[in-house]
Amino acid sequence: MIGAVHIGLLAACVVLFVPMAMAGWHLSRNKMLFFSCALFITLAVGVHLMPYFPSISDFLSPSQVISLSSPSNRDSCVSFLHSVVYSGGGVIKECGIGCEKRLGWDWDWVGSGRVAGCEFQKLMRSDASDLLNGSWVVVAGDSQARLMAVSLLELVMGNEAMERVRGDLFKRHSDYSITVDEIGMKLDFFWAPYVGNLTELVLQLRRSRNIPDVMVVGAGLWDMLHVNNASEYGSALRVLRDNSLTLLPVSSNLDVGNSKPAARFLHLFWVGMPMLITTMLNTDEKREKMTTAIYDSYEDELTTSKIWRESGGPFFKLDVRLLSELCGPRCTSDGMHYDGVVYDATVQIMLNALLIESNQKLE
Ligand SMILES: *[C@@H]1O[C@H](CO)[C@@H](O)[C@H](O)[C@H]1NC(C)=O
Ligand SMILES: *[C@@H]1O[C@H](CO)[C@@H](O)[C@H](O)[C@H]1NC(C)=O
Ligand SMILES: *[C@@H]1O[C@H](CO)[C@@H](O)[C@H](O)[C@H]1NC(C)=O
């Protein structure tokens, strides 16, 4: 890609050498000075007008992305990524194993104030394909992580292709691997219901020296139901945090020949726990063990273990609690697994975070 620096150097050379060449043609010093000034002014005006001519900007950045201007703006925008609103909703439709969709829900980012200024954009299939082209994405965790995998695959493969793989992806408690040939994206889902399983996976990746480009992980609900000890959960999180930090920053094995900055480093995301609606949970055991008090103590452990980026940890927090709470009881039938719209929003927030991190912007 031709950077602004190259253009600047080129301009400087033109201003310097063209008049000198002309001097070779026996122009007077005054004429040379005149040409120098004229050239300088032309180039300066040209550089300032360039952004207004899309065709020239396209030439400057052949890929679909341009740089975001100010880093401080980027950083403050990250904190607005979760500012979404839901709209519509109503009809229930069965759509195969593990899938029940309430149609008509939609979501978007808040359309006013500073959120609007950040110009977040829902990535279309082609945008997501560009961003994830040639990447290796690992999704690991419990059912919340699996629902993230579904939304991501739906986005890059389209609904029809997704229907064909949905049955395999939803085989209970199993791993799943798929390569989306069109964009050479590999997605691995690992069933890892406990934090210890995630740590094991991280250690395995480190041993194999084969590090994905994007990792989306999260666990908590199983622990709450089957172990129900928040302080043990916290200890496990701290072990995961320390081991995950050793993966960062690392050059991925996939970046050879891939000029996309997005695919160059491992990006770690944490899929948070959804809001639990105790009265809607579908077993007595769940209603008894997954109470608000226990949930809060698990959330506290997530905060104090400092696994999230905002407290110096390795994981960018995808706040599924907030996103599910905003949608509320109307978006879930069991008080724990929410409608696709919640995970679609979460996936889009993740992809926009990836764009911001890798300093890119959709045009
Ligand atoms: C993915 O990248 C490859 C090589 O960089 C390119 O040839 C291909 O067209 C890209 N595909 C998409 C869908 O962007
Ligand atoms: C996850 O960890 C639990 C407890 O350590 C273990 O029993 C289980 O086999 C592990 N599951 C996977 C898929 O590794
Ligand atoms: C939770 O686990 C810790 C450490 O294993 C143990 O000391 C504590 O008694 C447990 N708490 C409960 C409520 O079982």
Image: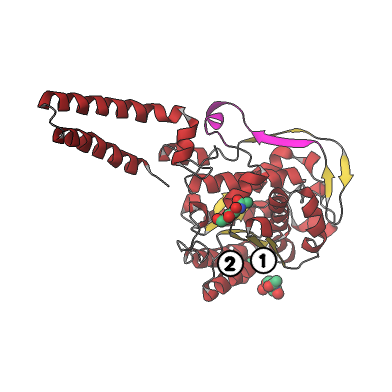
Residue 326 in the image: x percent, y percent? Answer: 69, 38
Residue at the farthest front position: 25
Quarter assignment of residue 298: bottom right
Q: Nearer the viewer, residue 25 or 137?
A: 25
Depth order, front residue of 148/132: 132
Q: Which label is found at residue 194? A: 1
Q: Residue at x 51, y 45 (%)?
A: 63
Q: Amino acid at mark 1?
A: Tyr
Residue 83, above or below 113: below
Q: Please, is residue 199 above or below residue 347 in the view?
A: below
Q: Is residue 267 left or right of residue 173?
A: left
The segment highlighted magenta reads: 104-120
Find numbered disc 2 in the image and state the secondary structure of the residue it sits on: helix
Q: Is residue 300 left or right of residue 182?
A: left
Q: Position of residue 321 (x, y in %)?
A: 66, 46
State ligand 1's quadrant.
Answer: bottom right
Alpha carbon of mark 2 to alpha carbon of mark 1: how far?
A: 9 Å
- Say if residue 300 shows up in the picture: no
How crowded pointer 1 is (Cα within 10 Å; few <14, some 14-19, many 20+) is rated as many
Instruction: Judge from the rendering whether residue 104 lies leftward or rightward of residue 120; answer left or right.
Output: right
Identify which amino acid the numbered label 2 is placed on: Ala
Of marks 2 and 1, which one's residue comes earlier in the chain?
Answer: 1
Residue 236 has which mark?
Answer: 2
Vertical side of 91 occupied by 270: above or below: below
- Residue 272 is situated, as x and y percent measured from the top left of the image, at 64, 52
Dots 2 and 1: beta carbons under 8 Å? Answer: yes
Residue 357 appears in view: yes
Colour pattern of the rendering? secondary structure
In front: 125, or 44?
A: 44
The image quadrant of residue 93 is: top right
- The C terminus is located in which quarter? top right
Tag 1, which secondary structure? loop
